[in-house]
Amino acid sequence: MEAYCLKCRTKREMQNPEQVTMKNGKPATKGTCPVCSTQMYRIGKS
């Protein structure tokens, strides 16, 4: 799954994607950037 890394400022393929539910009940996908190891989020069902 591809997501935008705020630290690298580019779209990258997310490592270890995991389906999560945010506090407001919306679905999201959480993972890490393969280059800088920053947490990445992609909001919405995927």
Image (cartoon, rainbow, N blue to C red):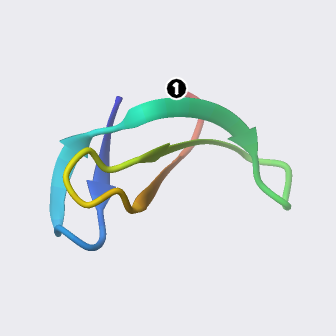
Residue type for callout 1: Ser
Residue 15 percent location from the top left of the image: 37, 34
Element on which disc 1 rests: loop
- 9 relative position to 23: left or right: left
- 21 relative position to 19: left or right: right
Seen at 47% across and 31% down, the residue is 16
Seen at 20% across and 44% down, the residue is 12
| Closer-to-camera residue (27/34) | 34
Q: Which residue is mark 1?
A: 46
Relative to 25, say whether 13 is above or below.
above
- 9 relative position to 34: left or right: left
Seen at 60% across and 32% down, the residue is 18
Residue 22 percent location from the top left of the image: 77, 54
- 46 relative position to 13: left or right: right
| Closer-to-camera residue (24/11) | 11
Relative to 19, say whether 5 is above or below.
below
The number of numbered discs placed on residues in the rendered structure image is: 1
Seen at 17% across and 67% down, the residue is 8
| Closer-to-camera residue (26/36) | 36
How many residues crowd around disc 1 within 10 Å: few (fewer than 14), some, or many (20 or more)? few
In which quadrant of the rendered image does the N terminus lie?
A: top left
